[in-house]
Amino acid sequence: MIDQESKIFHRSIQYTFGFVGLLWLVKITEYMMGLDLGFLGILPRTLNGSVGVITSPLVHGGFMHLISNTFPLLVLGIGLFYFYERIALQVFTWIYFVTGFWVWIVARSAYHIGASGVVYGLVAFLFFSGLLRKDSKSVAISLSVFFLYGGMLYGVLPTDPSVSWESHLLGSFAGIVAAIHYRNVPVRNLQPAHSLQVVNHEQPAPKDIFETKQVPFFYSSSKQLSYNYKFKPKGKPQPPTEKNQRPKDL
């Protein structure tokens, strides 16, 4: 059981770090080669801009932009792939592509880049998934996410024209839809499959009124012997008194 849990946890780390590592690889390559990959973002309602549905989360405006998305992605990604290991890939894929498609449909006519929409989608999924299913562990996870990233709530409002608030808002909607769709899928059971039980080592009461038992008996010769006798459940056994009843040495 522990080995299985360890494998799932390590796999969740591998998936999450693999995606985040890809983001950093793209940014470092862009920086080292002096490129500007902004054209790979989503340009709404244009044919050329539709490629951004696939590539826009991989492109970031600068290293600070990437760093601001890295830590939330690590925490949320590991939580998703560990607690929802059966549906994690489907949920992540849904949030990734549906957010981009909705941005391409309704967002402002500008290039939208970055993985912020994915971050908001994961936050919304974990939060509403716990609330909808009223599961104590899920609610604990969602509340932890809310307190850690509660400031992100303002990101869905059009307060900064340089920020793609549409990606944040639509990513949140994608996460909510995923939470509703998978609301009957529980989080992982954190309790071990086996639990400690109190074992009663006392001799159970005999089923019959008289029952034959073999018990150790110590004589003054320091040799441990055993003999068969019959006794009542509430009484104490008495050793044999006749010589011919003396037990043989072990």
Image (tube, rainbow, N blue to C red):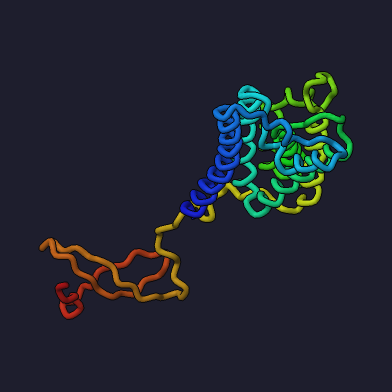
Splitting the image into 4 quarters, where does residue 176 fall? Answer: top right
> Which image quarter: residue 73?
top right
* Residue 248 locus on image (x, y percent): 16, 76
Residue 41 to residue 240: above or below: above
Q: Residue at x 69, y 46 (%)?
A: 92
Q: Residue furthest front?
A: 34
Q: Is residue 156 shown left or right of residue 57?
A: right
Q: Residue 247's x, y, as percent?
A: 19, 75
Q: Identify the residue shown where x is 87% and y is 30%.
A: 108
Query: In the rendered view, would you say 93 is above or below 240?
Result: above
Residue at far top of view: 160
Residue 144 percent location from the top left of the image: 66, 32
Is residue 152 at all visible to an observer of this figure? yes
Residue 143 in sight from this viewpoint = no
In the picture, which quadrant includes the C terminus?
bottom left
Q: Is residue 140 left or right of residue 219?
A: right
Q: Nearer the viewer, residue 134 or 112?
A: 112
Answer with the quarter of the image where residue 235 lies. bottom left
Residue 145 in the figure: left or right of residue 248: right
Whether 182 is drawn above or below 164: the answer is below
Q: Nearer the viewer, residue 167 or 75?
A: 167
Q: Whole-percent x and y of residue 139?
A: 71, 39
For image coordinates 57% across by 45% down, the residue present is 15
